[in-house]
Image (spheres, rainbow, N blue to C red):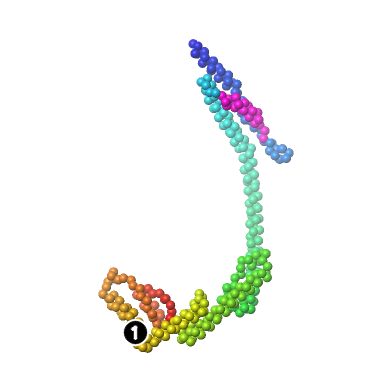
Amino acid sequence: MAATKKIAKEVSTVKEETKEVGFTDLELKIAKPTLNPDKTMVIKGNFEELGANIQKVVDKYKGTQLTEENVDYVKTLKKQFTSLRTGIERERKEYKKVYFDPAENLLDSMCKELLRIVDEGESALKTQLDAYDEKRKEELTVVLKEYVDDIAERHSLRDEYKAQIVLKKEYYNKTQDEEESVNDIESQAVELEKKQKEYDTGVMLITAECEESGMIAEPYIRELQYKCAAEIIIEIKKDKKASAELEKKAQEGTAVIGQETAELEAELHKAEKITEKQEEVRTRVLKVTYTASQAALMKDFFTRNGIQFTFIKTDF
C-alpha cells in the first residue's frame, strides 16, 4: 500500500511539471509583412516572447540529472521540443509561400520580360556594329591592297612573290596607325625582293651549269625550294661526273648494268617455275635511262603487273 502511494505521488509531480512547462502556449505567430517609409520590409510576430519562453525551459532542464523519477518526463519534454521545431519550420515555409514566393515569382517574370527587350536591343545594335566594322575592314582592305600593288611594283616583285605579302590582323585595329601598316608592308616587300633575287640568281647559275654539262636544268631548279644554289651546283657537278663515267664505260663496251640485267633475267626465269604461294617479295634498285614517252610506257607496265616502284632521283 505504501508503494502505491509513492507511485501516485511521482505521477502527480510529473503532471505538475508538465503544467509548469506550458508547451501548449509555445507557438510561433507572425503578422502580415508591412513596409516602412523607406521601403524596407517589416515582419512582426512573437519572436522575442517565444524565444524567451523557450530559453527558460532550456535553461531549466538542459542540466537535469536523470533519475527513475524524471526520465519519462524528460523524454516527453524532448518530444515537445521536436514538435516545437517542426511547428516553427512549418510556419516559416507557409509564411514564405503566402507572402514571399508570389512576389518573387512576379518580380522574376517582370524582370525576365524586361531583359528580353534589352537582349533584343543589344543583339540589334551588335549586328549593326558588326556590319559597320566589316564594312570598315573591307574599305581598309582596298586601301591596303593599293599600297601592296604600289610597293610590289616598286620592288619589281613577280606575282608569286607579291602574293606572299600578308595583310596582318593588326592592320585592322582601330588604334593602328596607317603609316605603321605601310612600313610593315614595305619591310615584307624588301625581304621578298631579296628572296626573289636569290632565286633568280640560283636559276641563272643552275641553268648555266646544266648547259655546260649537258644536263636538264628544270629538276635542279625545283630543288631551290628547299636547297641553296651552292648545294645544287655541287650536286650537278657530281651528277655530271657520274654521267661521264657511265658514258665512258658504255663507249668502252663495259657491261654497265650487266650484273643487274643478269640477276633480273634470272629472277624472271625462276618466276616461270614457281607458284604464287611460293613467291617472296624482293626489292632491287635499278638505274634506268628513258625518254618522256618511254616513261609513260614503263609506268603502265609496272602498274598493270602490280609492281611497286619509287623514284629516288631523276636526271642523275
In which quadrant of the rendered image does the C terminus lie? bottom left
User: Of residues 78 and 27, which is closer to you in this image?
Assistant: 78
Identify the residue at image location x=54%, y=27%. 79
Q: Left or right: 67 with respect to 308?
A: right
Residue 65: quadrant of the picture: top right
Residue 40: quadrant of the picture: top right
Identify the residue at image location x=63%, y=48%. 112
Identify the residue at image location x=62%, y=26%. 56
Q: How crowded is mark 1: few (under 14 residues within 10 Å), some or many (20 or more)?
A: few
Q: Left or right: 298 with respect to 232?
A: left
- Farthest residue to the right: give it: 37
- x, y percentage for residue 233? 49, 81
- x, y percentage for residue 111? 65, 47
Q: Is mark 1 on a helix, strand or loop?
A: loop
Residue at the spot of label 1? 255
Q: Against 52, is 297 above or below?
A: below
Q: Against 175, is 90 above or below?
A: above
Q: Against 277, is 36 above or below?
A: above
Magenta span contains residue 14: no
* Most common secondary structure along the magenta stretch: helix
Please name the amino acid that badge 1 sits on. Ala
Q: Is residue 103 visible?
A: yes
Magenta span contains residue 56: yes
Q: What stretch is highlighted in magenta?
A: 43-64
- Farthest residue to the top: give it: 1
Q: Is residue 145 visible?
A: no
- Farthest residue to the bottom: give it: 251
- x, y percentage for residue 169? 61, 66
